[in-house]
Image: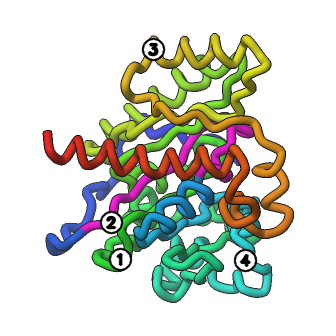
Amino acid sequence: MSEYTPSTPMQDQQPITVPSRKQPRIIAIANQKGGVGKTTTAINLGTGLAAIGRRVLVVDLDPQGNASTGLGIDRANRRISSYDVLMGEASVAEAMVPTAIPGLGIIPSNIDLTGAELELVELPRRAYRLREALAAVEGDFDYVLIDSPPSLNLLTVNALVAAKSVVVPLQCEFFALEGLSMLMKTIERIRVSYNESLEIQGIVLTMYDKRNNLSDQVAQDVRDYLGDKVYQTIIPRNVRVSEAPSHGKPALLYDHKCAGSRAYMQLASEMLRRERLSAAA
């Protein structure tokens, strides 16, 4: 897909005003670089939050549908998908599918989403389609986690416009900071043009290998660069986490004792703790 650059505001870009009610915390899981653990973070962070007692909705906005697969949603149960929600052909409630994890639902992705960008270009308020669809879920969920594709296109723009904040999975490898710099520029463009409340909630260091000195160096460089924005929890490279999607389960359900599962539970707890401290400040 071609990349979409939000350099100038769209016509009629102001969001529709809705009544002030209890809003879920809408978080985009985003990184323009692929292979950083973005989908793994979306499904396991969602599972961790649900395990703590939060009501969570995952929105699979990636045409590959890996979050749907990783949460065990069969192709036959994806007849209504995030594509239908974006196109205004189905509501969030109609598209949501329950998962095996109590308190965790998902809006799945299917092959239709592949052509969504071309169709969105012709629609009014194209950057706000997801935001306006999610306006109907006040009170139904505590968290909405959007698994966005690994590129800057209209699907990613919809995710960032809908979100209040961004969680960025960052692989502990050589070009991590270069990719992060590009993503921060993207977030700033979205903030200026479409969503002034958008902020980086946190950076999650993923695929950490304690045997590799480079992982330690990358982790330190990122902390030097972004300070407290980087979560203390680090997600290790873990075979059991890699195996889990092939069984249609998040790692926390596949093997809750493995190092990766424990790390994602710690991440969920750290996120809640940070939000409490921020609210009290």
- Amino acid at circle 1: Val
The question of residue 88 being in magenta is answered with: no
Q: Earlier in the sequence, mark 4 or mark 3?
A: 4
Check disc 2 and report its element: helix, strand or loop.
loop
Residue identified by numbered label 4: 73
* Alpha carbon distance from label 1 to label 2: 8 Å
In this rendering, position of residue 253 left or right of residue 238: left
Q: Earlier in the sequence, mark 4 or mark 1?
A: 4
Around disc 1, counting alpha carbons within 10 Å, would you say few (fewer than 14), some (14 to 19), or many (20 or more)?
A: some
Q: Earlier in the sequence, mark 1 or mark 2?
A: 2
Residue at position x 58%, y 49% from top? 264
* Alpha carbon distance from label 3 to label 2: 30 Å
Task: Give me the disc on residue 24.
Answer: 2
The question of residue 33 being in magenta is answered with: yes
Q: Are marks 1 and 2 in contact (CB under 8 Å)?
A: yes
Task: Give me the disc on residue 137.
Answer: 1
* Alpha carbon distance from label 4 to label 3: 39 Å
Q: In which quadrant of the rendered view does residue 77 lie? A: bottom right
- Amino acid at circle 3: Tyr
Residue at position x 43%, y 36% from top? 202
Residue segment shown in magenta: 23-41
Q: Are marks 4 and 3 in contact (CB under 8 Å)?
A: no
Above or below, 188 against 178 in this view is below
Around disc 3, counting alpha carbons within 10 Å, would you say few (fewer than 14), some (14 to 19), or many (20 or more)?
A: few
Camera-side residue: 144 or 99? 99
Check disc 1 and report its element: helix, strand or loop.
helix
Residue at position x 47%, y 18% from top? 223
Around disc 4, counting alpha carbons within 10 Å, would you say few (fewer than 14), some (14 to 19), or many (20 or more)?
A: many
Residue identified by numbered label 3: 225
From the viewer's perspective, is the residue at label 4 or at label 1 nearer? 4
